[in-house]
Amino acid sequence: MNGPGTRLRTALAAADDDRLLLDLTGIEESHDALLRELPGVHVRFAMKACPAGEVLTRLAARGAGVDAASPREIAQALAAGVPPARIHYGNTVKSDRDIAHAHRLGITDFATDNAEDVAALAAHAPGARVFCRLATDGDGALWGLAGKNGCSAEDAVRVLETARAAGLTPAGLSVHVGSQQMTAGAWRTALDRLAAVLAALRRRGIALDHLNLGGGLPALGYRDRHGRDLDPPLDKIFAVLREGMRQLADESPHPLDFRIEPGRHLVADHGAIRAHVSRLATRRAPDGTPRHWLYLSCGKFNGLYEMDAVQYRLVFPTRPGSPAVPAVVAGPTCDSDDAFSPGHLVPVPADAASGDPVWILSSGAYALSYMTREFNGFAPLPYSCVGDDGATASERHPADES
Ligand SMILES: *Cc1c(COP(=O)(O)O)cnc(C)c1O
């Protein structure tokens, strides 16, 4: 990753106010590249990573579906033109009302991981197809996501037997190895676990029709909290996935489909935020040490929610070649969490002035969704979609969706 592509760079240069820019063609290209790496896989975009209608419409036109987590997400995906058969309710946490609502919207596939949820599905979405999520430990991921979702191998067998007895169709198994998973080994372990549960179910006369490999595929352009390039081993990850899919398909006496739910991987590197410098200031800590702080117009509560776990690469387009000073980079609010890892200093132009544009790269994932309504009065960041010529379509606001 050497910086934004030409389309994004053109749009960043043309933007004269703060916004998130989404390169739809770049997102399509990463979708197509994923299909080339994992032939035959069914993509179900985890829409929470970038819930922009334009993104959903473009991906749906290329055959992708959606992993949705609530009736509102389902309704938004339907409105964007995603066929209901390609939308699944991927959240294991849902109320009776949520289930009934999704059922009315035509959704047939539901994630689960417990018997109470299965009973509710039988009552409120009769005839549904269910897939059971297996727990993973999240090791090797920046965000492990362990604990809240997924059950043990033994429980998965019981849950799907319960589903069958309740008149539902036990249809699949899923995993999520943790977001921004940096090791191929995590998928190896997950694939082994899927194989074992699949075999145990087969012995009980349950033949599933699909396995869902979940999310976790990494973005390429992040730095870690210490400012080092993350450099995920993507080729190795794809090799492990291809090999695991081949083995599982070979062992299965029935045709077996594979689904994958990329979120971050499809969108992170194809989005960039145009923000501006609020102030470059120098303050002394209580121990007397002077420290530079670069306050930006965008931070944890209006687009950079993940800024404490990853660092985004910054470009100061109007200060090329300026001498640099090390600074803590922080957002505009008065919340002390609204900062890049405060222990790590980032080189910034010594002459950065209030109002200077700043480009925040690889910020296309979890920007639109993780935005507060108006924390401290800082409005949610609008977004624009970038056309093939680098020009942007009209500004949209996150609240316009749905
Ligand atoms: C969030 C989520 C994803 C996407 O995760 P990424 O790490 O962004 O790829 C996929 N599946 C489920 C069930 C999720 O909750």
Image (tube, helix red, strand yellow):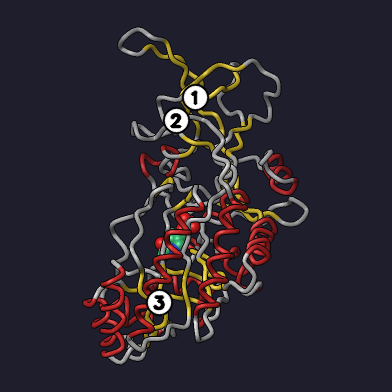
- Ligand 1 is found in which quarter of the picture? bottom left
Q: Position of residue 221 (x, y in %)?
A: 59, 42
**Above/below status of 325 relative to 193:** above
Residue appearing at x 70%, y 39% in the figure:
13
Which comes sooner in the sequence, label 3 or label 1?
A: 3
Q: Residues within 10 Å of mark 2 (few under 14, many from 20)?
A: many
Q: Quadrant of residue 369?
A: bottom left
State the SS at label 2: strand
Say above or below: 287 vs 153. Answer: above
Task: Give the amino acid at mark 1.
Answer: Leu
Q: Earlier in the sequence, mark 2 or mark 1?
A: 1
| Vertical relation: 52 (above or below) 86 | above
Q: In the depicted view, which residue is nearer to us: 373 or 121?
A: 121
Q: Which residue bears the numbered disc 3?
A: 198
Q: Secondary structure at mark 1?
A: strand
| Disc assigned to residue 112 | none
- Position of 394 with respect to 71 (left or right) is right
Q: At label 3, which amino acid type do we have?
A: Leu
How many discs mark residues in the rendered view?
3
Residue drawn 43% across and 59% down? 189
Q: Is mark 3 within 8 Å of ligand 1?
A: no
Q: Which residue is mark 2?
A: 330
Q: State yes or no: Cβ of the residue under disc 1 lies below 8 Å from any atom of ligand 1.
A: no
Above or below for 138 versus 105: above
Q: Is residue 72 visible?
A: no
Mark 1: give few (<14), some (14-19) or many (20+) Cα within 10 Å: many
Amino acid type at circle 2 is Ala
Query: What residue is shown with label 1?
Result: 294
